[in-house]
Amino acid sequence: MKFARQKSNDISLDLTPLIDVVFLLLIFFMVSMTFDRETVLNIDLPDAAGEQSNVEVKVLDVQISVEGKYAINEQPLVDQQLKTLKAAMMKISDGDTSMPLLISADRNAPHHAVVTAMDAAGQLGFSHLSIATSENSGN
């Protein structure tokens, strides 16, 4: 039995899968690429000359320790609950939300403790909020 071989010189290459792969790679690289646009503002701050005021301003000072424990004007709180912090802030400020509020947190204090103090101040309506820092000693 002889089988006749069919000779065909018609060789074709289907490019559709190749084009699909190229488009998928193109989409992958477009989606995964990040474009960094760094904007730097050069600000020349004005100089100010003045004398230190002798008028003593009453400030509500919220201290946060390394463990995340709160104290207000050096009076430690019984727990670290938001409601306790808010109650102590209102009691010590006598309900005066226009009083300046200073948050003095240890550099290793938990982030959530600082955010909780800021949240309590915002919920109570304190608008003059400052965060204490120390002078950079090159560390």
Image (cartoon, helix red, strand yellow):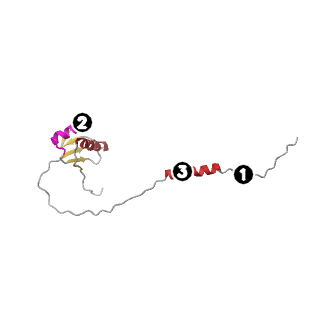
Q: Crowding near pointer 2: few (<14 within 10 Å), some, many (20+)?
A: few
Picture residue at 17% right of the left edge, 39% below the top: 91
Distance CA(mark 1)–CA(mark 3): 28 Å
Number of dots carrying numbers: 3
Q: Amino acid at mark 2?
A: Lys
Element class at badge 1: loop
Q: Which mark is residue 27?
A: 3
Q: Is residue 129 left or right of residue 38?
A: left
Magenta segment: 79-97
Alpha carbon distance from label 2 to label 1: 76 Å
Image point (24%, 36%), residue name = 83
Q: Quadrant of residue 66?
A: top left
Q: Nearer the viewer, residue 86 or 75?
A: 86
Question: Which sits earlier in the primary sequence, circle 2 or circle 3?
Answer: 3
Tag nearer the camera, 2 or 3: 3
What amino acid type should be assigned to the residue bearing mark 3? Ile
Which numbered circle lies on residue 132?
Answer: none
- Disc 1: which residue: 12
Q: Is residue 85 magenta?
A: yes
Q: Is residue 80 visible?
A: no
* Residue 35 location (% of width, % of height): 45, 55
Asked whether residue 75 appears in the rendered view, the answer is yes
The residue positioned 11% from the left and 53% from the top of the image is 55
Prevalent SS, magenta region: helix
The CA span between labels 2 and 3 is: 50 Å
User: Mark 3: which secondary structure?
Assistant: helix
Q: Position of residue 29 (x, y in %)?
A: 52, 52
